[in-house]
Every structure is written in C-alpha cells, then in structure tokens.
Image (tube, rainbow, N blue to C red):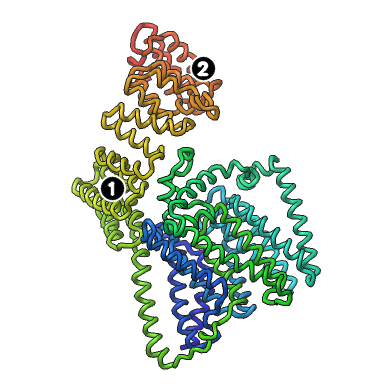
Amino acid sequence: MKDVLKWVVFAGLFTVPLLTLYVENDYFFPFITGKNFGFRIIVDILFAAWILLALYEVKYRPRVSGIVWSFGVLLIIMFLANVFGLHPQSSFWSNFERMDGYVSLIHTFMYMLVLGSVLQTKQEWQRLLNTSLIVAFVVALYGLAQYGGMIEGGNRIDSRLGNAAYMAVYMLFHIFVAFWLFVETRNVLLKLFYGTMAAIFTFVLLETGTRGTAIGLVVGVMVMSAYIGLFGKRFVQYRKYAIGGLILLVLAAGAFIMGRDSAFVQNNYNLSRIANISLQDLEIRGIIWGMAWDGVMERPLLGYGQSNFNYVFNQNYDPRLYAQEQWFDRAHNIFMDWLITGGFLGLIAYLSIFGWCVWYLLVGPLIKPEDETFNVMERGVLLGILAGYFTHNLVVFDNIVSYIFFAIILGLINARVGLIPPAVANYKVDRVIITQFAAPVVAVLLVVGLYVFHVPGMQAAGDIIDAFREPDPALRLKAFEQAVARDSFAQQEVTEQLAQQTISMVRNQQVPEEVRREYAAFTEEQLVRLAEDKPGDARIEVFIGSYYRAIGQLDKAAEHMAIARENSPKKQAIILQQGFIALSEGKNQEAVDFFKEAYELDTRNLEAREYYAASLFYVDQPEAAAALLHSDNESVTDETILQRFAASDFLISSANQFGQYAFAAQLFEHRVRPETGGKQEWIDNAQNWATLAYLYYQNDEAEKAIAVLQEAMSKIPSFEPTATCFIDNLENGRDPQEGCQSQ
C-alpha cells in the first residue's frame, strides 16, 4: 500500500505542471475552468495519499519553516476575512471567470506543503522542473505558431492560457526555471539547451505585450545578476557572466529606450506597447488604487473578503473612469488587492511569506556565511524570480498558473530550509490503525469531498455549453434548468447566460409562445433569487435592469437601475441607462436630467455629451443642444466632438424627429467632407449625400441640395441616375424623392 501511495503522490505532483496544456472546450470559460478543476482534484487526491504516506514514513511528514507558518497564518486570516466579508460565497468559491477565492488559496498551500515535504533531493526537483520546462516549451511553440499566423490568435500571444497576461507570467517563471537548471548542470549540451529555452521564453514573453511582466523580467534579471556579481566569489566564471549580463541588460534597456520611436519597434504591436510605457499609463491604475484605498479605510483590519473588490469599486467609483472597463473585480496591485481582501492583517501575512524567503536567501546567509542550504547561484536565481514575480504583481493579479508556480518556488525553498517538528517525527502510528481506520476514513472523505465540492461546478460548466450547442429552444431551456439545479457556486454566471438567451427568445416570434413564456418565467425567478443572494451588487442590478428594458418591462427596469444607482452613485453608465429608460417611458425632462448629470460628472465624456444633446431636442431646447458642439474642456476639441456627433445615428434621428434639420445637416456635412474630418466610408456612401440633400430641402435650401447632389455625382458615379432624378424634382418644385426610388 505504501508504494501505491508514494506513486499517487509523485504522479500528482508531476501532473500539475501539465495542466497548462489543458483546455476544456466542453466547459464554460474553457481556459480557466478545466485547469482549475483539474488542479483542485489532483491536489485533493495527492494530499489525501500524502497524509497516509506520512503516517507510514517519517521522512515524508510535513517540513515546516517560516514560509509554512506565514502561509498558514494567511489562511486563518483569510478564512475570517471571508466569513465576515460582504459575500462569503464569492469569497470562498469565486466564479467560473476567475476560479479564485479561498478554495484556490488553500489548494495552493496544500500543493506547496506536499512539494516541500516529499521532494527531498536535487535530482527529484530537477525532474519536476525539467518536466515543467518541457511543458512550457510546448506552450511556447503553440504561442509562436500564433505569432506566425499558423494558429488563430490576436496581436498578443496567449497560447493555451487564453490570456496574454497569464501567458506572460508563465513564461516569466520558466525563464528563471531555465536559469536554475542551467546553473545546476555541468553538461555543456544541457546548458546550451537551457539557455536556448530562456531565450525563446523571453521572446514569447515580450510578444505577449504584457508591460508589467516585461518590467518584472528586467527587475528579476537585474536582481539575480547583481546578487551573483556581488557574492559569487567562488563561482568566478558565473560571476563574470552575471556582471557581463547586467551590463548588457543595462545597455540593451538603454538602446531600447533610445530606439523606442524607430520603425522596427513601433511597427511591432507588442514591442510598441512596451516601448510606449509612460507614467500616464499608471493614471487609470492610480485612480483605481485611490478608490481601493478609500475602501480600505472603511474596513482596515480584515478587509472585504476575497472576490469582493467589485463592491468597493462601484461604491467609490470615480467618474474619470468613464472610458474604461466598467466592472473591475481586482485592484491590479498586489498591495491593494490584499488590503481589500484581507485588510492590513491579510497584507502583512502575505508579505511575510516573501519576508521569510528574503531571510532564507539573503539575510540568513549574510549573518551565517557558512550556510550552504543554497549556493550563491541558486540564491541569485530564486531572488530573481521572486523579485520579477513581485514586480509583475504590482500591476497584474494572480491566476491559477501563477499560483501553481509560486507554490513550486515556495515548495523548493521549504524543501531545503524546512524541518520536521520533533513531535511530528516521533509520533508513531500502528500500521493496523492506518490500514483499518485512517485509510478508509481518508478515502471516504476524499470521495465525498470531490463529489460535493467539485462535481456540481463541473457539471454546471458543462451544462452551459450544452445549452449553447442545443438548437431546439425548449431543450436549451432544459439545459439551463439543469445548470441551475446543480446549485453550484456559479449561479450568477448561469443566470446571466440564461437571461441573454431569454432576451433573444422573447423577441423571436418563430419560437412558440408557450416556450417564450417558460423562458421569461424561469429567468425572472432566477433573477429575483440572484438579487436576493447578492444584495448591494450594482453590476447585478444593472444586468437585471437591462434585461427588463430589453423585454419592454420599463417599470421594473427603472426600479433595478435605481437600486444599482444607490450602490454606485457616480457611475455614468448607470445614469445613462436611467436616462434611456425615462426616455422610453416618455418622461422626457427626467431623461434630460439624467443625461445632464452623467455629462457633468466629467465633461470629457463624449458618450454622455452625445446623449445629453440628443435628449435636449425632446424638451425643445435645440440651442442648448447646439452649444454642446463646442468644447468646454481643454482636453476635448470641437473637432473631436463634431466627429463623435456626426457618427451618432441616435443624435441625428433625434434632431430630425423634432425638425432641427440645420443641426442634422451640419453633422452630415461633416460626414461627406474630407476636409472637415469625414471618413472615407462616409464619403463613399451615397445614402449620406442623399440624406444631406434631403435635409437641405426640408430646411428650404433647395439650391444647396442641388449643389450637394451634383458634387455627389462626381464622387460616386453609380449615384448619378438617382441624383439626376432628385435634381429634376427639386428644380420643378417637387419632393426630391418622388418617383426616384427605382433609379
């Protein structure tokens, strides 16, 4: 039995790095859910096997260090923070999109603890790291195929991770894994191989276009090189490499900065993203961090619990973010994220993990030069990866991939510095107790735990995809009903997808009336449940309000938008929705008040300016609408406003509806005149010229209508027959369109 347990533990430890390749296309959020469920299940199994193995053999019992104690304290603090946070279920389980939360945190700890307790020799760690390196090479090749256009992808490489930032930090870890293996081997061919891997991973990282991680790489390599250069007296050759590499890095960085405006850099999308970094790029992040800090001051001790930043973001929303993503769920800064989730206690506990790493790798060896737990080269590489990872997290947040490899690094350090507590080492267990009591109990707990904690979520993730693939509306609804019945942690996402389907079904007259009623009734039931389960969540209220607006229930739409507004008073997107609902209800002045309020929160907001101008026509204030064509903010030009207004069919339609033909004509003049900013697709569109001519006609400017039609004929020859007919009608005092529709 002991050999079987050992095999299960080692197989599990070595399988986890393979998860990077796994994409479960039969699950909702295929790049996220498959990896996370796989990680949790594998860790549960190997952890259960490890408990029994440790009872058999003392050498496999938990090795404890400051890292383990700090991580354990973090788990205790975060448990309390989540229990007393705003929405414990989200804190413990997260959702399909992130698959974060306490469950992921505790599985990361479990994986780290088993790694540091079981892998005890350099050879075992080299096998694990080589396994992960080969997987990373396959992932990098897939990314290079995206880069070369052989596999479909965007401008930024994301490979098997589905997100360029996730790919970047994965490459960051493996650049240093390659460095570690490089210094651990004396084989020249292997050194060449590891050096090549590091170069490939560096190229792929840069082509993810993830600026924070690129800076993290530079910082990490500088820390590694500087440490080896300062303390690597016994490694003369490596010390020379480190010093030379540091100088080369500084020169390369300087050359890159000097050549940032070159065609080579600017014509490469990802290099240009990195080259164009400026302090202004942190402006948006800085606003978000300020909002987060306001939230921290309200709950400084334990914070809000994991996955609850959205409450802080919405309540403290800054109108200057009008043009950004409207529903941030992370502060995108390691300090602010931990302050929000766990308060100052959580942040201190988290930082203490890094503190212990610095103690073991930097401070301890300075105090005790004879300490040979790690040699200088190993310490340099580990300090480099920790510095690079920490820098990356200053502007990005963790995900399952970064959690896994952070656990591997911590496990590697703990394997060297951790000790089995004497009380644990001396504890003896009779084999009969292990086989007849401990093993059955652990096995039952494992099976029950897997079924209760993981299976419902996996089934629901599959049900959503099954629903999407089902062409029959009635059967599609059954799939959604089944997903809801799983009672998983992802009820919000299931309900949101259901509601989106219901909107299209209700509008589709080809769907039987009975089925449409069933969709509407079931969806409303789930939306009510969702609002009750997550009170105070502005995003949910906006979603529900938008749903009711889409199906024409304006009173309920207004009710839920008002609740959303209470939870996020200054978010223009919500106020604009209130304006549109009021407009649809015929409450024109109320709509104007909403649009005006949204506009005045930040007058640079062109969307709010556009809707405010359009609404003014509904209350007979055309002069006020025309005044909005002119900027009252030095950061917005009249030309920018005119360009936005000219592109707005809603604004033009509003002006035309209330007889403001001169205003509408001014916007169409902008569309068709290249010298005033008209885009080519506007200029080449005969309908724009015809509409402009008709607006002139409606405004009693027949001569201008004829002139514009003549100009249109010269620019669009195919328009000549219709234009000629229009002109003939105008010259004879008839409606220009009379008898011309067939031309």
Residue 690 visible, this angle: no
Q: Quadrant of residue 411?
A: bottom right
Amino acid, disc 2: Ser
- SS at mark 1? helix
Q: In this view, does 124 lie above or below 19?
A: below
- Looking at the rendered image, the quarter that the C terminus falls into is top left
Residue appearing at x 32%, y 46% in the figure? 541
Residue 628 visible, this angle: yes
Which x, y percent locates residue 446? 39, 77
Which x, y percent locates residue 613? 40, 25
Q: Mark 2 points at which residue?
A: 714
581 with respect to 251 (left or right): left
- SS at mark 2? helix
46 with respect to 368 (left or right): left
Residue appearing at x 43%, y 60% in the figure? 99
Q: Mark 1 points at which residue?
A: 502
